[in-house]
Image: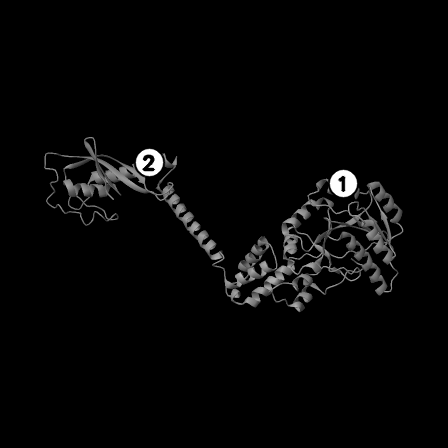
Amino acid sequence: MYNDKIDSRQMIIEGPTLEDCKVRLYQRYGNRYQIISHRVELKGGILGFGQKEVVCANYVVDERFGMGQSPSNGNYGMSRANSYTDRTVYSGGQETPNQISAGQDFANRRDEFLKNQLGSGGTITNLMQMANLSKQIQTIAQDINSIKEATSGKELHPTIRKIDSYLEQNEFTQSYIEKINARIRNELTYEDLDDFDLVQNHVVDWIADSIAVAPKFSKSKKNCHTIIIVGPTGVGKTTTVAKMAAKLKLAAKNKKLPSPVIQMITTDTMKVGAEEQLEHYGGIMGVNVTRAMTTEDLKDLYDSYKSDVDFIFIDTSGYSPRDFENIGKMRTLLDVDGMKADIYLAVSATTKPKDLENILRNFEPFNFRSVIITKCDETLSYGNVLSVLFEKNKSISWLTTGQNVLHSLERAHPMHFLKYLTGFTVDKDHILEKYGPEEEAEESQ
């Protein structure tokens, strides 16, 4: 676009270059015009990017000839006026000294203008770099939008949508599902996605890899092994203590070894009949049960038993994860000098992800060794628990799978969780070859 406007007694013409302005002035006035001054302005663009140079020339016309009178070659340059790359020719096809000087003057004024706009050292190169940067930013933004569209639910590959559906059915958290999706995109090719069996085998392996199983421990032959079970109310801590003691007794009997000497202590002051319940189990197994109400009580009992027994199991009160005061008191009660105990956190397999996150966070001060998942017989979906334990980097030691004290405690193994996956086909032989056989909890727990 060209714009002419009257400014006092002078007129102004705008064009992409000074030469183009001169061509148009010559077409209109012949040699009767005179350019008084000119400047370069930047116009257009968005937020300063993508702007174009426009030359604004102030000129006057010699009024001795009629306004609008054209030179003899009045159509000269008309076809060239719209071509920004052509050089306009005057005076028989040669550039005049004034034109050369005007070109140099334009370059000097251009750089001076850019220096004022861009600071010291500013040149046309700076502006070009800024324009290129703007273009790159726009390209990146377009790429990001394309990626968002390609990874939206409507654009996902059918295999990924199917995998997501299966993971959701198994109650894995959204953040866990997103991590699986990221691995699919990063580690598998687009051609791989057309083979659903291949993809699901990878996903099952990744789920198995995300299940951290705590290593077994071996009891010291010189000292007793002290085990403490903590956790919120109602998760089955007391029965878990009984099941662990019973397993030790049964394992020794099956191996025709001397029965281990076990002492059970309860510090549970909240649950009605907690001591009586533990005494009931202890009576069946021939295990003594005592109560500790304070840290001093627990220290006295520990000091009196540690040299004479193989295992000490300590049952604790159950509190809401938000009962910070009583959880703190229990932590103090268990802080016995010289008692090096392995502490385990018991959580129910049916716990919702947010609740499990709170439990892990609020029982963290106990520095528990790993997690025991209880009540596994009450659900067939473990995605909720597995997701949170993976994200919080917590391992699993045991599972309780029923009410039978002697036969419902199992060592944790990935296969136990994988075999209940809804929708997925699990290659059991492959999993057992990779992670070893499933085992029951034995003496070397």
- Name the secondary structure under disc 2: helix
Give the answer, above or below, for where 261 lies relative to 112.
Answer: below
Characterize the local packing of mark 2: few (<14), some (14-19) or many (20 or more) Cα atoms within 10 angstroms.
some
Q: Image quadrant for the N terminus?
A: top left
Question: For the residue marked with disc 2, what is the amino acid?
Answer: Phe
Secondary element type, mark 1 = helix
Give the mark, 2 or 1, whose residue is nearer the N terminus: 2
Q: The residue under label 1 is which amino acid type?
A: Lys
* Residue 214 horizontal side relative to residue 107, left or right: right
From the top left corner, tell me how far across and down residue 427 is, in percent: 64, 68
Q: Residue at x 57, y 54 (%)?
A: 174
Residue tagged by mark 2? 113
- The colour style of the image is one colour
* Cβ–Cβ under 8 Å for marks 2 and 1: no
> What residue is at 78 percent from the left and 62 percent from the top?
407
Estimate the x, y position of residue 56 in percent, counting from the top left: 25, 38
Number of residues whose C-alpha sits closer than 10 Å to that of mark 1, classed few (under 14), some (14–19) or many (20 or more): few
Residue 175 shows in the view: yes
Give the residue displayed 26% in from the left and 40% down from the top: 103
Q: Label 2, label 1: how many angstroms apart (C-alpha)?
A: 74 Å
Q: Is residue 223 above or below residue 377?
A: above
x, y (%) of residue 8?
20, 30
Q: Is residue 335 above or below residue 410?
A: above
**Residue 56 higher or lower than 312, as above or below:** above
Numbered circles on residues, count: 2
Quadrant containing the C terminus is bottom right
Residue drawn at (36%, 34%), measured in percent from left and top? 116
Q: Which residue is mark 1?
A: 329
Q: Quadrant of residue 39?
A: top left
